[in-house]
């Protein structure tokens, strides 16, 4: 009888582990990764308990995946599929006191859904605070709560899922509301419409010794990479990176390989692959704007060559006329 009880306990334990949204791997939400393979190289090979995989779940539906650093209390990255616009108006952004927390950071919790603070027991909240950032960390800090999976890439029925503190990192206001916002709009309005499938991974580079209230790491950089496959099965990828400072808000376009090389330097020399199943020779994404600019350049170069040819011809004729005139005088 005791043996049956032990077996039953093991079955129940396995059931809970399979449904937990802080997970040992991303198999429960691998649809957010290209070819169902999570980025590699961010976690040391010998493992590190500080990094937690989260299948971001709200109302029993998974919306994106996050690798979270419980030591620095910021996400390493969030992976997601942007929603195609459906024309419905998004609800207003919630007050930060109503943002979500990860209940499974509390000892013994098996609640798969993100929860608001008002629904979490005080004793559980104390355990959660040890492992992730909370609203109080950001108050009076002069930093915004920077989304990795952004609100603006979601439709009305899914945008609320982005307001979880495990999807946030401290971001300089002028950077968040400036060029980084422009990048998010560019991805949403220019790249997304031309893709049948668009996989996005957005992350941060932690700073060495810059923290909010000695708890939450302030990233030195924000970065993002995407893989696009259009209806003709043509494939391309691109990447972006920007410094999280007031001095310069520039967001630079780089190749996927260039971004991975930059990340390698900051992650202890480990080989970083954001899309491990992707061929490293994948092409740079070409937008209609790029095509237009190339066409303009071609026209300019052609006109310039014609101009040079005409000028050289006129110069030759003038020299010949002057020579003939001098010969007649002689």
Image (tube, rainbow, N blue to C red):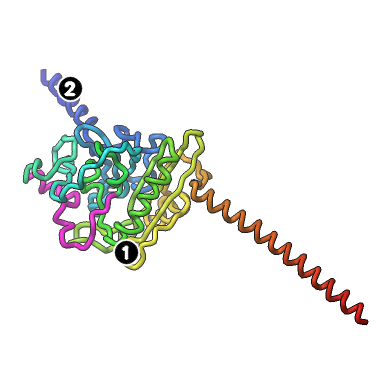
- Left or right, residue 270 beside residue 61: right
- From the image, which quarter does the N terminus lie in? top left
User: Looking at the rendering, which quadrant does residue 324 occupy?
Assistant: bottom right
Q: Is mark 1 on a helix, strand or loop?
A: loop
| Residue 293 shown left or right of residue 117 in the figure | right
Q: Mark 2 points at which residue?
A: 7
Q: Distance between the residues labelled 2 and 1?
A: 55 Å
User: Which is nearer the eye, 65 or 139?
Assistant: 139
Residue 23 image-quadrant placement: top left
Circle 1 Cα neighbour tier, 10 Å, few/some/many (<14 / 14–19 / ≥20): some
Q: Specify the segment rendered in magenta.
A: 123-147
Residue ID at (7%, 45%)? 123
159 or 324: which is nearer to us?
324
- Label 2 element class: helix
**Residue 140, x across and y down, in percent:** 16, 62
Q: Report which residue position mark 1 lands on.
A: 245
At x 41%, y 53%, the residue is 240
Residue 68, position as x, y percentages in the image: 27, 47
Name the residue: 43% across, 35% down. 196
Residue 178 part of the magenta-drawn span: no
Determine the image quadrant of residue 15: top left
């Amino acid at each position: 009888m005791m043996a049956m009880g032990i077996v039953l306990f093991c079955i129940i334990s396995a059931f809970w582990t399979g449904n937990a949204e802080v997970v040992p791997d991303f198999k429960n939400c691998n649809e957010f990764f290209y070819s169902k393979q999570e980025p590699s190289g961010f976690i040391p090979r010998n493992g590190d308990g500080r990094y937690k995989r989260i299948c971001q779940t709200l109302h029993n539906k998974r919306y994106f995946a996050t690798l979270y650093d419980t030591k620095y209390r910021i996400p390493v990255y969030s992976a997601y599929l942007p929603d195609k616009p459906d024309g419905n108006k998004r609800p207003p952004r919630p007050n930060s006191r109503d943002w979500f927390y990860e209940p499974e950071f509390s000892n013994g919790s098996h609640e798969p859904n993100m929860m608001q603070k008002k629904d979490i027991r005080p004793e559980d909240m104390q355990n959660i605070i040890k492992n992730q950032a909370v609203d109080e960390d950001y108050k009076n800090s002069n930093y915004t709560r920077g989304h990795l999976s952004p609100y603006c890439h979601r439709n009305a029925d899914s945008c609320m899922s982005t307001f979880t503190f495990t999807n946030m990192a401290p971001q300089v206001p002028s950077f968040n509301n400036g060029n980084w916002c422009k990048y998010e709009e560019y991805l949403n309005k220019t790249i997304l419409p031309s893709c049948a499938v668009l996989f996005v991974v957005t992350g941060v580079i932690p700073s060495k010794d810059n923290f909010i209230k000695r708890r939450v790491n302030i990233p030195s950089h924000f970065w993002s990479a995407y893989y696009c496959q259009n209806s003709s099965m043509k494939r391309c990828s691109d990447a972006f990176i920007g410094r999280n400072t007031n001095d310069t808000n520039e967001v630079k376009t780089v190749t996927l390989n260039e971004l991975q090389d930059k990340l390698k330097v900051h992650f202890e020399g480990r080989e970083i692959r954001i899309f491990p199943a992707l061929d490293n020779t994948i092409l740079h994404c070409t937008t209609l704007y790029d095509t237009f600019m190339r066409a303009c350049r071609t026209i300019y170069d052609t006109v310039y060559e014609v101009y040079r040819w005409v000028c050289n011809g006129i110069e030759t004729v003038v020299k010949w006329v002057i020579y003939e005139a001098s010969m007649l005088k002689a």
